[in-house]
Image: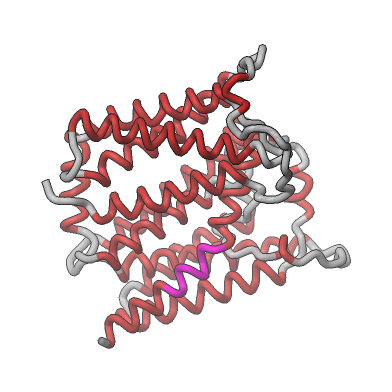
Amino acid sequence: MRPSPLARLLFAVYLLLIVYASLYPLSGWREHGGSPLEFLGTPWPRQILVFDALINVLAYMVLGLLAVLAWRPRLQGAAAVVGALLLGAGLSLTMEAVQSYLPTRTPSALDLLCNALGAFLGALAGQRASPWEQPLRQWRARAPQPGAHADFGLALLGLWLFTQLNPAMLLFGVGDLRDLFVGPAGPARAPELFVAIEAVTAAANLAAVALLASAIAAPGAPVRAMVLALVLAALATKTFAFAVILRAQDGLDWLTPGAAQGLVAGLAAALLAMGLPRMARLALAAILLMAAAVLVNLAPQNPYMAAMLKLWQQGHFLNFNGLTRLVATLWPFVAAGFLIHLAGRRRD
């Protein structure tokens, strides 16, 4: 079995995301004067939240799975499982210790145990991944182009799907920097303005993502079918986020008139633009990404979204929300840089 550069890239990215989510919001650091490992001797909480424990297990299951896949073929079998367990336990111990210096975080031995268990279970799953790993390897060898640039593009598309887990974001509305700049509230706006903003934002970003996917596709690959599958996956992720993070009956609240119009327009534009030459697709995708980011940042706050999100008690989703916001903020700028890299690589 040959090593998988894509698995190694996803493992490295996920490791960084775990660290950021564990230490979010990265502010308010304090010196408590005690040992950072003091939490190991404290009793467990009387009331254990099953949902929180399950989230910790699942988060580190993904880490353990990616670790085993990334280490192949250099490390396999029991050695890979033990290595993933040590990695998960060591990383969790470090993060819990560092959390003792953050007033908004509470280190817990239970979290450490859940994380280590998750890494172990994920590693076991990785050892038994052959039934579905081989078809994925075959798809990777056939549909996207070979090389590290295509692996990076696939990772970008995966992170774009990840951004859909943030219910506070307009449909495909990545690149929002407004939290960095606190400005005065503007006058009330007509509902038609917000419908138009969401429609244009969703359409531009959807078309740009589709063109990015087409730029890394291999010659002869079913690009339009791949794009349709990617869009369906994004909408399913968005629905799942609204149903779980908000309420089950709110699963389709993202489907506003503006979102529906943007979906239709963006999908139609993407399918038509795929017939353009490759350089034209790269340039158009970069332009659409930057135009949508500018529009998102110049748009006034949507009162509908603000009223809806008042119902959202972030609670244990606070750190996860911070993580998805970070990825959504940076994504279009990283993607635009990647498109420029693809254009320069083509010229060379």
Screen quadrant of the C terminus: bottom left
Q: Nearer the viewer, residue 250 or 123?
A: 123
Task: Name the side, left or right, on which 180 lies relative to 264.
Answer: right
**Position in image of residue 25 (x %, y %):** 66, 48
Residue drawn at point x = 76 percent, y = 67 percent: 181
Tell me: residue 327, above or below residue 134: below
- Identify the magenta region: 330-337
Q: Is residue 51 visible?
A: no
Predominant SS along the magenta part: helix
**Position in image of residue 123 (x %, y %):** 30, 32
**Position in image of residue 241 (x %, y %):** 56, 40
| Res 21 quadrant in image | top right
Residue drawn at point x = 65 percent, y = 50 percent: 26
Q: Nearer the viewer, residue 78 or 4?
A: 78
Q: Nearer the viewer, residue 301 or 159?
A: 159
Q: How many marks?
A: 0
Tell me: residue 258, above or below residue 313: below
Residue drawn at point x = 29 percent, y = 60 percent: 151
Task: Name the side, left or right, on which 202 lies relative to 190.
Answer: left
Residue drawn at point x = 32 percent, y = 67 percent: 214
Name the residue furthest bottom.
347
Tell me, yes or no, whether the highlighted magenta stretch contains residue 150: no
**Position in image of residue 98 (x %, y %):** 59, 41
How is the model colour-coded?
A: secondary structure
Name the residue furthest left.
1
